[in-house]
Image (tube, rainbow, N blue to C red):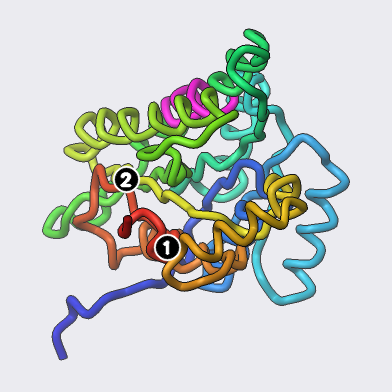
Amino acid sequence: MDNWLPNFRLDGKAILVTGASRGLGLAMAQAMAASGATVVLNGRDEKSLEDACKAFAEAGLSADIAPFDVLDMDAAEEAMAGIAKRHGGLYGLINNAGHQHRSPLEDFADDAFQELIAVHLTSAFQLSKRAAKLMLEAEILDESKPIDRGRIINICSVLSSHGRPTVPAYAAAKTGLVGLIRGLAADLGPRGVNVNGIAPGYFLTEINKPLLADKEFTAWVEHRTPIGRWADPRELGGAAVYLMSPAASFVNGHVLTVDGGMTAVL
């Protein structure tokens, strides 16, 4: 049998997921843990992370926690060093942490714009830089095979390519992530670290509660999406497992859209 059959297993790989106490981050972490990874859950609320980690253990999945604010690089660097020490290295990073601020442009606060850029874009650059340093330390076990030192995934959005009213800062940050992915892919790909992105559509998450409460908007999403509904967070797990796994060994600098077809149609 051909030994190049797709391999989606993540056994023995330590993967840090930011913003993983709930929503898309938690769903992606669950999927990767089910594929054998040791997932490291990040967030600012240590109690929530501990509760999530306990649930993983009860399900027979391997998880750890790393509570820190993604804007605090001293804390992040210390946490990443701890992960590498506890788990023999850091193989994967998913930059998922984020929040939202909605306002008409004329009322959009300058500091709200700056904070969204910092949380979604600047932190992704800074965390990727620090994670890459750890990944590049990984030993090349078999020089006859393609170099594989790690993976970085940035969580983008359908707003990385399309606009919506009241969210200019979010759209700008998510669009910037696409450029960051391409730049990091060019820089790190030759050294064995693949960098890609996932662009989710409209998912049933905490961040979208204000939208879900708007019946007109909810109906618009359902009508605008060919599949005809909002997505369950668990439906993002497969994309994360794929891009983190050996099956995606030649995928680099790509953004995988998971939106039920929303951005594919007029």
Looking at marks 2 and 1 on the same chain, the residue that comes earlier in the sequence is marked by: 2
Spatial CA distance of label 2 from label 1 is 27 Å
Residue in the image at 15% along x and 53% along y: 143
Which region is colored magenta?
119-129
Q: Secondary structure at mark 2?
A: loop
| Label 2, residues with CA under 10 Å away: few <14, some 14-19, many ≥20 | few
Magenta segment's dominant SS is helix
Residue 106 at what x, y percent from top left?
A: 62, 12
Amino acid type, callout 1: Ala
Q: Amino acid at mark 2?
A: Glu
Instruction: Give the left or right position of residue 261, taking residue 130 as reference.
Output: left
In the displayed orientation, state which residue is furthest to the top.
Answer: 110
Q: Quadrant of residue 253?
A: top left
The circle on residue 239 is: 1
Say if 154 sits above or below 22 in the image: above
Queried whether the magenta region covers residue 30, the answer comes back as no
Check disc 2 and report the residue beneath it: 139
The x, y position of residue 43, in whole percent, is 72, 39
Whether residue 172 sits left or right of residue 178 in the image: it is: right
